[in-house]
Image (cartoon, rainbow, N blue to C red):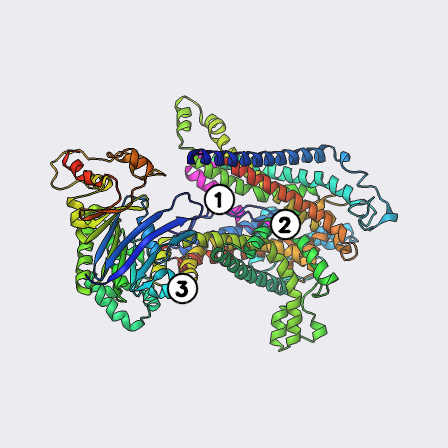
Amino acid sequence: MSATRMALAGERVRAAARDRRMLARRLWIGGTIALLLVLGAAPGLLARGDPYELHVGDRLEAPSLPHPFGTDEAGRDILDRVVYGARVSLGTAALIVGLAAAFGTAYGALSGWVGGRLDRLLMRVVDLFLAFPYLVLAMAVAASLGRGTASAVVALALVWWPSYARMVRGQVLSLKNDLHVRVARTLGASGGQTLRWHVVPHTFDQLNVRFTLDLGYAVIALTGLSFLGLGAQNPSPEWGLMIANAKSYVFTAWWYAVFPGLSILAVVLNFVAIGDELARQRR
Amino acid sequence: MSAALLTVSDLEVRYAGARTPAVHGLSFELGQGGSLAIVGESGSGKSTAALALTRLLPRDARVRAGEIAFEGRDLQRLGARELRALRGRRIAMVFQDPAGSWNPTRRIGVQLRDGLRAAGLGDEARGRVLELLRRVGIQNPERRLEEYPHHLSGGMLQRIMIAGALAAGPSLLIADEPTSALDATVQAELLALLAELRAETGLALLIISHDLAVVARVAERTVVLYAGKAVEQAPTGALFSGARHPYTLGLLRSTPRRTDAPKTPLAAMRAGEVAARGCPFAPRCPLAVERCVVEEPGPRRVGASTVACHRAEEVQALAARPA
Amino acid sequence: MSAPRVQADQVPVIPGGVPAPHRERRRAATGVLTRLGWLLVVLWAAMTVTFVLSRIVPADPARLAAGLQAGPEQVAEVRHVLGLDRPLPEQYLRYLAGLARLDFGRSIQSRQPVAEDLKLYLPATLELVVSAFVVYVALGISAGVAWAVWPRGVHAVAIRLLSIVGVAVPVFWVGLLLQLVFAARLNWLPVAGNLEYEAYGVPLRTGIGTLDALVAGNLPAFGNAVEHLLLPVTTLVLGQLALAARLTRASLAHQLEQPYVRTARARGVAEWRVVGVDALRNALNPVITMLGLQFGWLLGGTILVEVTFSWPGLGLYAFNSFRTFDYDPIMAITLITTVAFVVANELVGLLYPVLDPRMRES
């Protein structure tokens, strides 16, 4: 076989391997999204019982066949609570990042588009937000608004939006001068229309990646607040709250703290992997 | 002819994962106090070859040669420490990018001192360094040593680099495109300086360049490199007046000269890829025939050159024809 | 040919929250005045934010202060004493004036001025934060350098693994696990708290266990203090370590490709000098930026770790304040940590011209 044909054959084998890997990744992402939808909409399909039901007789049982993750101090099956907790933790995290991204994007896009002194002023405000150690600020806000998931959402969204603003503003600043934008303006599009239809959509790629990664990190931040008693309240099956409750029993009932933590790990890893994949596709 | 200072035979450099070697089959000799130029276009492997001699290439480069003999010792057999001892002390190097070759956050003097210490010279050498700096044309050398690189011009930085290189009294200076980043007048000054220093100290010079004009001024012998392979090797004068390889001819022709009539069109070589089999230059060669595509030419003696071309004898006839 | 600009999507996301912003290198001579001015603006903003937060609290602070048994007249009296019946702008000014006097209000649970409580709790937090930060910087940079110089090996795999897992778990969970394994099961280290002052007969001087033990010349006590420090510090450092290592490695690897490194090697300079003295210096620029930002995470993480390990510092104080709706301490802690964070980053800013002479000129 000629050298060329051998090289081409090698290329084909490599390309086929690449396609297989890409398919595997796509399936993974699809599977994850499907699982999330099920967990969100119908956790009952995966759980086997009621996460709120108390069985005081079965408290703090080690993992076993009927209770693969063991039970907590109120006799509730931890696996069920973890499954239902996914909805709480992930849903809340999605809300937080959604709010932060929405507001941050609008703010940043406007600031970058308008430019000049107003832009500088708006960014100064962002700098101000970023000058605070964010976890501490979130705690203070959550504490002041009163306990509960709603306070946690407001607190974290408040602390999260500035980085979206920064990111989008940077992109808008560089996209502003692109040819297609100038063409749109010349053809009569108003500033607002151009921004909305021709500039902002190009930020979506990077936004998607950031959003996906942040979903995972928001879950962690949320669990932090719940651990301190500032987020979800009992008897919600939020994962951070479960770990907080587990703290008192950790030496005798290790499963109580370990399994919710492992779920968090699994979920966040997943989001990071998806985010990385999205980032790779961008290039 | 004095005993060879540097003898390289059959040098091959291959990067991990690359299909073709960056340099292969390169052999040359440099005598005491002599000067040799390695010429080629970008990507021809000339810098790689120079860096390979003292193992300055990145980790994934595999260097193999029949021998790399310097002052009688085979450099390949030396341990890392022994080789490092040679660097700076016996073999000095000057590089292309004067601004980039200095650490921007440390003073010039401190960086020179590092090199001197590595060469075994202590602070007593400071006087010598100052003397050398003056010799290479730096006024107020004491002040200059206290400066940071970004305060000085490219020409000055290069001069200081040369002075630093010579401070330990090496027998060989390898200069990798020393003047490419400088403008013409500075270039000329620097080359003149190199020639003077050579005459004064008996320093041998191995100069890498893509610029034939530079080569003509400083090198006694020239090696022409194409795609990592030496296509022609000859005393510089003979090379210029009687090239034996179509590539060399093409290079000479494409260099504009003062003696050309104004508005003479620039002669360019035909573009083409590097052939994987047979003669690598064949796709671009005006003299290429069937044999060239099939059989890679080995080096042979033709006239004053050692040349790797099946049709070397006919190249001069080609030269007679108008471009 | 400069230290690499860290791109926005390369800067590691600080786990647990906000991604690190793209920090532009500030020109050193951005006037000392301008920087001081910014500091004051942030300070003012922090004070205003804490004021606003303390006023939007759902519970009635006067009632909280008076206690649950108090009748309406007592609550009204407390309200008057605390100045809560004055118009808001006046309250604001009084608040600012109080802060200037370092009057942070009163704590309901301890029944004494918050400033007194702070004196009590601050030293332990200082001990924890400083130890964790020092360990973090030293280990992180060393790991990064080792990784850059020897790209393949167990350490590279370990760091990569750690960097993936480290940011994917809550810090308090790591703490619990460490407690479970090393304290409860293996019994190698104490479960909670800091130096056992009484058990070792060390007089309480600064409140910083290790320091007090050293000052008292009591070596076994020092050992005990260190043992108590080990798990909390490890918890804080573990998750973030890989981030510092990664950035150091990337930055150093970039520097090692620069021409000046090759020149130094060609001069015969020893490899360790080339890496450690020449290249590392230039590689540190983005690293110290990140370290400054990580300090902010550290402050938040410390609160969580102190709660997990019952470490008697500001974090535990804050946690108790959350539970008892004691707002003055919460605001005080927010203020202090914000100031610490801003100061830390300003200090980082001061380091740039030290490392890079090009930034010294205006």
Q: Quadrant of residue C188?
A: bottom right
- Secondary structure under the numbered disc 3 in the rendered image: loop
Give the residue pinned by disc 3. B79
Bounds of the magenta segment = A111-140
Q: Residue B157 location, x and y as percent?
A: 27, 57
Q: Residue C329 location, x and y as percent?
A: 65, 56
Name the residue located 67 percent from the left edge and 66 percent from the top edge.
Answer: C194
Subunit ID for the residue under disc 3 = B
- Residue B185 included in the magenta stretch of the image: no
Mark 1 vs mark 3: same chain? no
Subunit ID for the residue under disc 2 = A
Image quadrant for the N terminus of chain A? top left
Q: Quick check: C227 above or below A116?
A: below
Hey, what amino acid is under mark 1?
A: Ala
Name the residue located 47 percent from the left edge and 51 percent from the top edge.
Answer: C250
- Secondary structure under the numbered disc 2 in the rendered image: helix
**For mark 2, does the 10 Å Cα neighbourhood hold few (<14), some (14 to 19), or many (20 or more) residues?**
many
- Secondary structure under the numbered disc 1 in the rendered image: loop
Q: Quadrant of residue B103?
A: bottom left
Give the residue pinned by disc 2. A140
Which marked residue is nearer to the observer: mark 1 or mark 2? 1
On residue C119, the disc is: none
**For mark 1, does the 10 Å Cα neighbourhood hold few (<14), some (14 to 19), or many (20 or more) residues?**
some
